[in-house]
Image (tube, rainbow, N blue to C red):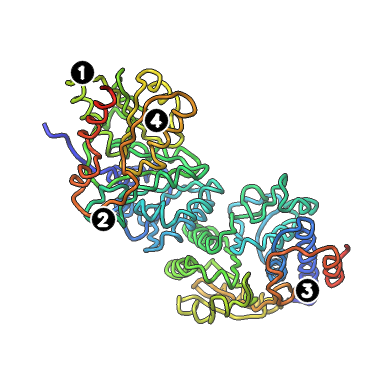
Amino acid sequence: MNIQLVEKLKKTANDIRILSIKAVYNAQSGHPGGSLSIADIMSYLYFYKMNVDENNPKMLERDRFVLSKGHASPALYSTLALRGFFPTEDLKGFRRKDSYLQGHPVMNKVPGVDMTTGSLGQGFSASCGMAIGCLKQNLPSKVYCILGDGELEEGQVWEAAMFAAHYKLRNLCIFVDFNGLQIDGNICDVMNPTPIDKKFEAFNWHVQVIDGHRFDEIDEAVTAAEQDDRPSAIVCKTVKGKGVSYMENNYKWHGQAPNKELYEQAMNDLKGVK
Amino acid sequence: METEKKATRLGYGSALADLGDKYNFYVMDADLSKSTMTDLFKQKYPDRFINCGIAEANMMSSAAGLSTLGIPVFASTFAMFAAGRAFEQVRNAIAYPNLNVKIGATHAGITVGEDGATHQCCEDIALMRAIPNIKIFCPADYTEAYSCVEEALKINGPVYIRLGRYNVPVIFDKDNYKFEFGKAITLADGKDIAIFTTGVMVAAALDARKQLMLNGIDAAVINISTIKPIDCDSIVHYASKCGKIITAEEHSIIGGLGSAVAEVLAERQYAKLYRIGMHDEFGRSGKASELLDLYGLNAQNIIEKAKAMCR
């Protein structure tokens, strides 16, 4: 990846963070922490990697994306808006009664959303269904899916992991947003899902562990994933609340909105326009 | 002559296998393909059959994802696991986005028999009825089960098909029968009492009608093979005409056909009602025929209740 590209993706990731915080602040409701931690992955996928067309969101041969940790919808909506799937002004309606931007993503209502998610574990399974379908239909499509680390506590995740390996879903690439925190605290205190990499290896996956905020590492991992005939898990070490000083590594910002003062501070941190 | 008996699951499996050429669809199963009869499809179309192993939650959400490619998916397992274990997957991944997944749920009700209460699902209609977007079919015999599969394919959205393991009389002639979505089917008209019934209990209701006739009671028998959306007009018609209704189902009287009929009666046209079904209790191990008698899911009980209501 050249420097210009990395700078562009960084800037886009920052824009995703700004729009995510704005959406949550406007709604006074939503999940900022886990939206900020995946912003770089979202930027990489939608502004570099994925074959999608904002003018033809249902294009059959497109790559698919499933946000299995659907509560990070601010990051997904912000990404899709920036990519041109719908106007960024619509983000103001996030979580409001008359908006199509529901608290958790809903397909068919939001252009560019490939799967309805929010109930943890299910998006991963759905991405497996998409991946096996794309292989059987001889589509060139890749299926990308982001899971939370806390989400790995859902039993269904391991049913899906077994399924994907059994059917050698080489077109499936998941990112685990390993930020170490869930609603009730540190994942290792609540219900320890580690070692994540060893678990996926035991399930016969191709596994890599990277810094989820570094575009060169993300790109190298995705490229390596494509060379393997197994499904790929990229365990991304991330910082929950990345980019907003008081939110970083603080589980309390999993699912609450900032007040005016903290919102302004967040915009200062992100150098966004208030 | 003894009536031929076949299980509704066989009608389902046979239809899938026969329709494989005419329609493009996938079939998923959770390690029960020989029991759900999806094995018949697997033999003919192995490339379009996906065994998900003993993992029903993943199967339902995967079926949802697969269907987004624009090809319908039949997901099959026992009713207990389809509607029970994977309830939330059916609700959130299939029904909420209104995806084109058909759930072929076999081994419903107590006629599972010897396996006992853990496998005897008498709550699935109640569970599925409460979910928006889902249509519910409950065929009465092999022919209806066979016929409803193609109708399910014509609906662009989720359908729950309730099927049984038990061999029940073949009521309908395969060459002349066509399942009609959303329509109550009056199998016999009558003026004294109306028996609304579904699934296994349809044959019993027809038997009961014959006996009642000898006792001077003219009973209508109506087959409700589409439980949702229910044919309100038919219920209102018979409530008005007979004033007395019995519902008979191999399901809990809470939330099933009996409840659905009661809702219509309460809102649109009063009639005296008695619900035959499982009375807020779990089943037990035994032969299917023995269990049907034990829980009053038979012609005799329908006759007794009808006589009492017409007295």
- Disc 1 from disc 2: Cα separation: 39 Å
Q: Chain of mark 3?
A: A
Which of the labelled discs sits on residue B180, or is there none? Answer: 4
Residue B198 versus residue A105 in the image, above or below: above
Which is more foreground, mark 4 or mark 3?
Answer: 3
Q: Earlier in the sequence, mark 2 or mark 4?
A: 2
Disc 3 marks a residue whose amino acid type is Gly
Which is more foreground, mark 2 or mark 4?
Answer: 2
Q: Chain of mark 1?
A: B
- Disc 4 from disc 1: Cα separation: 32 Å
Question: Residue beneath label 2, please?
Answer: B116
Q: Residue furthest left?
A: B1
Disc 1 marks a residue whose amino acid type is Gly
Disc 4 marks a residue whose amino acid type is Glu
Residue nearest the viewer, comparing A192 with A101: A192
Looking at the rendered structure, whether the residues under marks 1 and 2 are on a common chain is answered as yes
Which of the labelled discs sits on residue A243, or is there none? Answer: 3
